[in-house]
Amino acid sequence: MATISLCMIVKDEELTLERCLQCAKGFADEIVVVDTGSVDRTKEIAEKYADVVCDFQWCADFAAARNFSFSKATKDYCMWLDADDVVPESEQKKIVALKEKLEKTKADVVMMPYDVAFDAGGKPTFSYFRERIVKNTGRPLWEGRVHEVITPYGNILHEDIHVEHRKEKAYDTDRNLLIYEKMRAEGCVFSPREQFYYARELYYHGRYGEAIDEFRVFMGREGAWLENKLEACRQMAVCYGQLQKPQEQLEALFYSFTLDLPRAETCCDLGRYYFDRQAWREAAFWYETALRVEKRKNGGGFIREDCYGYLPCIQLCVCYDRLGRREKAVSYNEMAAVFKPEDRAVAYNRAYFANVSKA
């Protein structure tokens, strides 16, 4: 059976670290915790669980810290988690079973879904695959000062083993942007991936015109990843919407169709564009198109789960009600209930239709 070293970098994580390490006991053969400057009880908690606890002088470089944590690993494979990640018990058992598979397949990288947003019922609404477990090569694998990544290589496995990102506190929202701007001031040439994430940080900070400019630079970069280009189209559309430029907003969304087959997320964005303008027929077309789109589970891109079921259905309920097609509206509301049985919007619509039928 293959063995796994869990390698973590942490700072001031006393709220969540113990929860994470409790999960790790179920599958990790070794736990390495690297502290980057905590002033709370983080190291005290780490020492209760970890085989190795050590310090790393923070240098505004997440890849450097990750690589340092991996350098302390002694097992066959390295796995990473953030302190506010959770591995449910069912998924812990899958990782234990995976260790048998790793020994047989000699996999280099294991990609696993990362669930980072949830609805009121705890169901994931936003997820994407991350390189979660990699063979311990003894050499640096992480790249990128911010949004660090290991480029998948060799024998790659995609496993349906979910890690949940469950934040319990707010983080410094300026940190990543400041690192990118420091890199730019130093004359660093961004990789296509860094260009994409820099544009996203500008978008998150409401600097919409600058974000559009940087997204456009990214789109023209050789080696830019398709899934990031599709996401860039959607985020440029949001920026144009904020700048009150509806024609450019539409053009950004439609341009994504020249790159690859439509994604449900883009179709829902188009549905919302027309929905907000009370163009019910056009909105219905795009929401129904979203329902027909196949979800690319192993594509690696960001997946907004609601776009592949619940969201188009609940919006189609409204569209067809406004178009006077009550029976079809009711049908779509019940389809939405299949995805979210306890949803308040579904319950509201049921009450609405009941009252209308009595009138």
Image (cartoon, grey):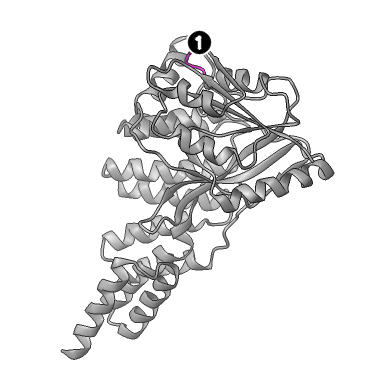
Q: Would you say residue 117 is visible in this rendering? A: yes
Residue at the far right in the pictured view: 104
Q: Is-magenta flag for residue 162?
A: no
Quarter of the figure that contains the C terminus:
bottom left
Residue type indicated by callout 1: Gln
One can see residue 299 in this view: no
Question: Residue 327 in the image: x percent, y percent?
Answer: 34, 85
Classify mark 1: helix, strand or loop: loop
Name the residue carrying label 1: 57
Q: Is residue 118 above or below residue 220?
A: below
Q: Which residues are magenta?
A: 57-61
Instruction: Tell me the residue at 73%/28% (across/down).
Output: 75
Q: Residue at x 23, y 78 (%)?
A: 351
Q: Quadrant of the N terminus?
A: top right
Residue 66 position by quadrant: top right
Can you tell which quarter of the image residue 212 is in? top left
Q: Give the answer, above or below, for where 339 lies relative to 356.
A: above
Report how many numbered discs are placed on residues in the image.
1
Residue 290 relative to residue 280: left or right: right
* 33, 253: nearer the viewer: 33
Query: Residue 296 versus residue 35: which sits nearer the camera?
Result: 35
Q: Residue 239 appears at what percent x and percent y? A: 34, 40
What residue occupies the far front of the structure in this picture?
Answer: 48
Q: Nearer the viewer, residue 66 or 263?
A: 66
Towards the viewer: 228 or 241: 228
